[in-house]
Every structure is written in C-alpha cells, then in structure tokens.
Image: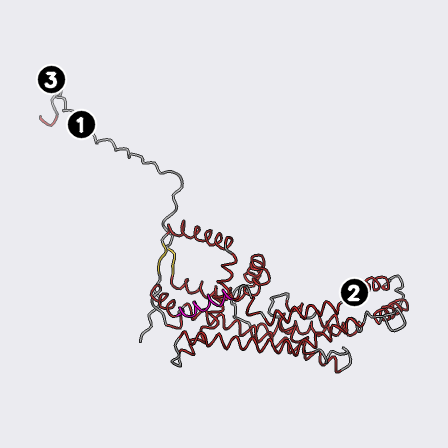
Amino acid sequence: MAVHAPRKTEIPRWVQLVGLPLAIVGAWQLVSAVDHAVFVFIVAALIAILLNPIVRAFCALRIPRPVAVFLVYGLFAVALSGIAVVAATVLTDQVRASASVVQDEFEPRPGTNITPADEKVDRIQSWLDDHGLASVDVRKLGDDAIAKIRDFDLESHSGEAVGIAQGLVLTVFESLFNIVLVIVISIYMLLDADRLSRFLRRLFPGGSREEDLIERCERALVSYVRGQTTVSLVIGASAGLLMWILGVLGIFENGDDYALAFGAFAAVTEVIPYVGPWLGAIPPLLVALVQSPGAAIAVALAFLIIHQIEGHIVIPKLMGGAVGVHPLVVIFSLLAAAQLYGVAGVLVALPLVAVGREVALFLRERLTLESWAGHPIPVGVPVEVEPREPPAPQPARPAPPAEPPPEDAPPDATES
C-alpha cells in the first residue's frame, strides 16, 4: 500500500496577522488564570503518553482497551509500592547511621567539653601555625560553626526528615499534585487515545501510521525517560562505587558502609536538571568533612570526576537527541517552569519540551504559511487620482497657395 505524503494546509495571511497573535495571547492568559488545572492536565497527558505504548501492547493480545488500561495502572502501582518498600527498609537505616556519624562529631567526650570536631580544628590551627599562617584563626570560625551545628541537633532533624521522606514515599501516588485528578484524567486520555489518533488522521490526512502525532510524542517521551533513567542509574552506581572504594582504602572512613545511600541519593537528584548533580554530592561531602579534610577533598574530587564523565560521555551518549532542542531553549523552559510551578514544573519541563518539539515538527510538515512575497502591506490611506487625459491632436494646417509671378517679370530664358 502506497504511503502518501502529508497534505499541507495553507494558513491565510489574515490569520497570520490577526489569528495567531490572538491565539498566543489567549493561551498565555489561560495558563495564567488556571495554572493549576493546566498543570494537572499536563502531568496527566505526559503519564498517558508514557503508558499508551504498554496499553497498545496489551490490546495486541486481544485484551479490551479498558481492561488493558486498568491492568497497566495496577502494574504501575505495584512497581511503585515495591520501590517504596525497598526505600523505606533498606535506605532508612543507612540514612540514620550516616546522620549519627555527623552528630557524634559534635558530642563532647565523656568527662570533657571537647568534641572530636574541636580536636580536628585544633590540628588544623597547629598546622597553620607551623607553616607561618598563624594570622588565620580557624578556631573562632570552627567554634562558631560547631556551636551552631550543636544547637541545630542534626540527628533529631534528620530523623524528622527521614520520617517525612518515608511518608512521602508511601503516599506519593495519593498526593502528587492532586493524584486522584491526574489518574482520572490520564485514564480518560488513554481510553480515547485511538479515537484522538483517528481524528488527527482525518484532520491531517496522508503519511504513514508511524508518523501519527500520538505515536511521535510517545517515542519522544519514552526516549527521554529511558535516557534519564539510564543516566540516573549510571551516576548513582558510579557515586556509590567510588564511595565504597574510598571507604575500603581507608580514605573515607565508613564510606563503604553508606555507599548504597549515597548512590541512591545521587541517582534521585540526577533527575533535577543542572542543580541535581551538585545536590547529590552534599551528603557524602558533609559526612567526609566531619571526619577529615583529606576525606572531604577525596569525596569532592570523586564527584568532580563523576560530573566530568557525565557531561562529556554519559549525557552525550545516552541523552543525545532525547530532547533535540538548543540548550538555550532548555534553560528558558526550566526557568519558566520553575517560575510557574516551582520544583514540580522543573521536573516536567524537559519531558514537555521533548513532546512539544514533536508537535512543532508535526505541524510544520502539514501546515504552511501563505507567502507575503509580492503582496506588500499597504502603508497609509490609498487615494484615487483621476488620470489626466492627453490633449486631442490638432489637424494639420494646409500649405498656403503659391503666389503668381509679377507681370513685369522678364521672360524665362528657356522660352526663347
């Protein structure tokens, strides 16, 4: 069966001049007025696009589409529950243990008011004094920092943070941006996905089925999620492995004990663009800093190496083409999403950019703008001017008759 090229629809000049600006302004006013509803629909649409290939695979097994939709959501809920159980049981102990290590550094030794952190500050000050840097007084800075940290009671706050994290993980599919509405809307979208595809094919005829807008958006979103998941796993595994190596070598004491927690935290924060990779280095750096400056330097160098590998090898190989837009567009999208919806907007910005790119390419292949060449926009008010008629041609005047010669003229010599 021959595949016809998509037919292009020409947009008239008056629509370009009036309709498109009004549509842009109206869309912006709508987003500003009902931003929460728009965000809920955006999240629901992204979830529906991401799950639609799985639903279509179940439908290929002669399972009715409504049953396939609810089956996919059931499997999705089971997977999230399993991840929550693992996080609550395995990672919680390591988080508490690493927090207690930091807290112990600021607890006075029995019978004295001297803490391990005080001893480390004294050793640093002695090293500075021996090398002619006595003017640098780190004791005062260290005492102030230790007093603030001691008053802060890191262990109790970390316990609260762990409790909040556990509650958030266990209830994430109940409270994520009004999750009930998101699920209901995404279910309706999944149930009507085929109907929407047929409507778009009637609206934009021509082209193969693989070039349908819905399937193109699915491929773009699945490609982005697959790439981002792989990057997070690679970065998390690399961070955990390096922390384990530093712990085994004795450079970062207890680094091997908390390698799993450090790697998991780095993998999760990798989802946040630009800022996430640096956030992932904070917990191991804090734990290493209370042990020794050398351990902190080793951890900082390890994460610097990880980020260099990420920027030059992992991201280009695994995420290249996943979004497919200029970096300036990505940065602007992140800033705009952060201003509109906060951290949640940042998390959905790049998937939305990937889908928006496919929508723009789809419309570009099927819509064309009527050319303005040869049709300049009139400037000023046209004034009709009556053309001036040329003067009527005058008839030629007849030549005057020849005058007869005078009578007394001498005869002509030829006559004789």
Residue 247 image offset from top left, x and y in percent = 75, 80
**Mark 3 → mark 1, Cα distance in angstroms:** 30 Å
Please tell me whether mark 1 sits on a helix, a strand or a loop.
Answer: loop
Q: In front here: 98 or 318?
A: 98
CB within 8 Å, label 2 to label 1 = no
Q: Nearer the viewer, mark 3 or mark 2?
A: 2
Name the residue that disc number 1 marks: 397
Mark found first going from the N terminus, 2 or 1: 2
Which residue is found at the position 60% from the left and 66% from the top? 273
From the top left corner, tell me how far across and down residue 45 is, in percent: 47, 66
Q: Amino acid at mark 2?
A: Ile
| Start-end of magenta stretch | 180-193
Residue 411 falls in image quadrant: top left
Residue 12 x %, y % = 36, 53
Left or right: residue 144 versus residue 415 is right
Residues 223 and 260: in front is 260
